[in-house]
Image (cartoon, rainbow, N blue to C red):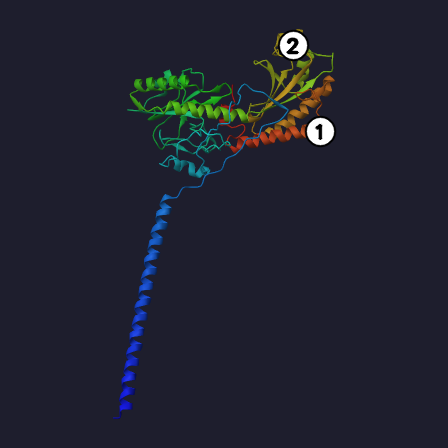
Amino acid sequence: MSSLQLGLIVAGVLLVVAVLVYNFWQERRLARRMADARSAAARSDLEASRRSAERVEPTLGSARAVSAGSASQPVSRTATSESTFELPVDVIAPPAEANRADEGSAEQLADVDSEPSAKRAFATPGTIARSTGVSQVNDAARGAPQPDHEIECLIPLSPAAPVTAGALAAGLHARIGKPVRWFGRTNARSDWQLLSSNAPGHFGDIVACMLLADRNGAASRAQLEQFAQIVADVGTSIAATSTAPDLAHEAARAESLDRLCAELDVQIGLTVQMPEPASIAGTRLRGVAEAAGFHLAPGGRFEYVNEDTGAVLYTLQNLRPDAFSPEMLRVTATNGVVFLLDVARLSDPARTFDQMKLAARRMAHTLGAQLVDDNRRPLDDAALATIREQVADAAEALRAVHIEPGSSRASALFSA
């Protein structure tokens, strides 16, 4: 064998070995890359799982109230600052989910924002107060009144044995200066029942509720303390355990709720005024008002009532400071009357305004008077259309914070 042949053989062997080594190195390199990719994917999945476990549900943004303009009438409640009543806002649960709320779901407690900001939306009924364990769902879903954690101070009672409503008489008849309601249920899976002294049955769970604000203002710290003491005394009498909430926090909630409602409290007035120096005899005014469907109420005003529901749609008041009474109407006269509509207490404020506008126009025509606004400026079609928009805006402002006009919640907050 020549040296050339030997050299070729050696070169061929070395080439084969080099190819094998290169292939082996490439396979190892690819294997390392695949291992690194699997490790990264595993870490990514672990991180995603961790983030999912810590995920916070999105909440609804803030909503700013819209108040009515020149046609609005003042009410006793007044706004004192821009502080807001902040409540947790959760996805609105349909009635089908309301029952599941009683079976263990829990939401955050309402909190008060100490810094000025836009008004927050109310949490929808359906929340459960974690500190009390008291569930509360929309009245419409239950078809009956329910505890309302967002606008009431709630104190639950757990008696050692079920008790009758009569055992709660001291609490049921308590007078604190703010409305108090008591609810009972047989067990945790039962519906809450609004209690009266003669309510039948025995109740294993009880909750006392005091309204935090109405048109008379916010519940004071003294009223909250009195409420807590009454509940504690009732608890002692029925051998029940109870835990009162932080009363300072509840007082702050009451003040913030009152400020929010003050900004949303709108009443619309249309004035029927006689030209000077004419006046309307009281007897004639009563005849015209009753012919229009009004009746004289004990509060010194005429009321127009929905025949189906019994709700007051709008009222007729004296333009002068004097209240109406049968005696006053027999012997005196007035230079005008005011049609007044309370937006928060009506289920359809804009439609009711249309009805009131027609009634005011008819009365002005019948009496030979003029329809004017608060500043005694004549109201034409354009001005009345603007006022109607104000009514609609005020109703939407209430809905934006989950106070449905005409609802039980609105009736409680906007009562005197």
* Disc 2 secondary structure class: helix
Q: Is residue 166 visible?
A: no
Q: Amino acid at mark 2?
A: Leu
Q: Position of residue 78 (x, y in %)?
A: 53, 21
Q: Is residue 247 visible?
A: yes
Q: Report whether 114 appears left or right of 157.
A: right
Q: Within the image, what quadrant is residue 104 found in?
A: top left
Q: Report whether 359 appears left or right of 126.
A: right
Residue wearing tag 1: 381
Question: Closest to the observer: 10 or 362?
Answer: 10
* Quarter containing the N terminus: bottom left
Question: Which numbered mark, 2 or 1, is in the foreground of this view?
Answer: 1
Residue wearing tag 2: 329
Is there a contact, CB below 8 Å, between mark 2 and mark 1? no
State the residue at coordinates (45%, 16%).
177
Q: Position of residue 220 (x, y in %)?
A: 43, 19
Q: Amino acid at mark 1?
A: Asp
Q: Is residue 272 above or below residue 282?
A: below
State the residue at coordinates (49%, 24%).
258
